[in-house]
Amino acid sequence: MGNNIIITNNPLVKEKYDEMFLVEYYDLGFLELLELVRDKIHLGYKLLTHPLSSSVKPNETPYKTIIVSTGEKLDNDSLLIIENGILTAKKLIKDTGLPKWNESILEDFQVVDLSVIEGALNRL
């Protein structure tokens, strides 16, 4: 995967890929993870996966995994995509709030996020 980095708040993704790829794990919520990725884009990183990929909405799951590549200059397309993702996430969370899921459902969401990122890794 070269200079690519997996950024996640999903412990299952960290557990599975930490030995194979550069994984940055953060104990953050969905929105906070998007904001962290935005900050990295300002440092020259480029999005390789969309921040709102999958049919699971930001107000439905606390987990998100995003793949970025390192770079040296601001990628305006990546910045526009992440900013729009942040705005969408904020709107959805504001409108409906965040549910309090039980441990079993949280584990299911981890598996869904892992599955989405596995599909992306197979295409990179």
Image: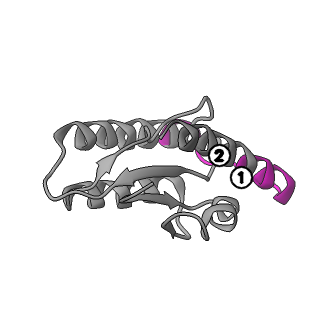
- The residue identified by callout 1 is 110
Please check the rendered image and state whether residue 98 is part of the magenta-colored stretch, yes or no: yes
Label 1: element kind: helix
Above or below: residue 79 compared with residue 29: above
Instruction: Say which quarter of the image contains residue 9.
Output: bottom right
Label 1 to label 2, Cα distance in Å?
5 Å
Q: Residue, x 61% and y 37% (percent of image)?
A: 119
User: Residue 54, position in %: x, y?
Assistant: 58, 32
User: Residue 2, position in %: x, y?
Assistant: 39, 58
Q: Residue, x 38% and y 39% (percent of image)?
A: 85
In the current view of this chain or complex, which residue is farthest to the front?
A: 2
- The residue identified by callout 2 is 113
The residues colored magenta run 94-110
The crowd level at tag 2 (other Cα within 10 Å; few <14, some 14-19, many 20+) is: many
User: Residue 113, position in %: x, y?
Assistant: 65, 46
Three-letter amino acid code at the position of disc 2: Asp
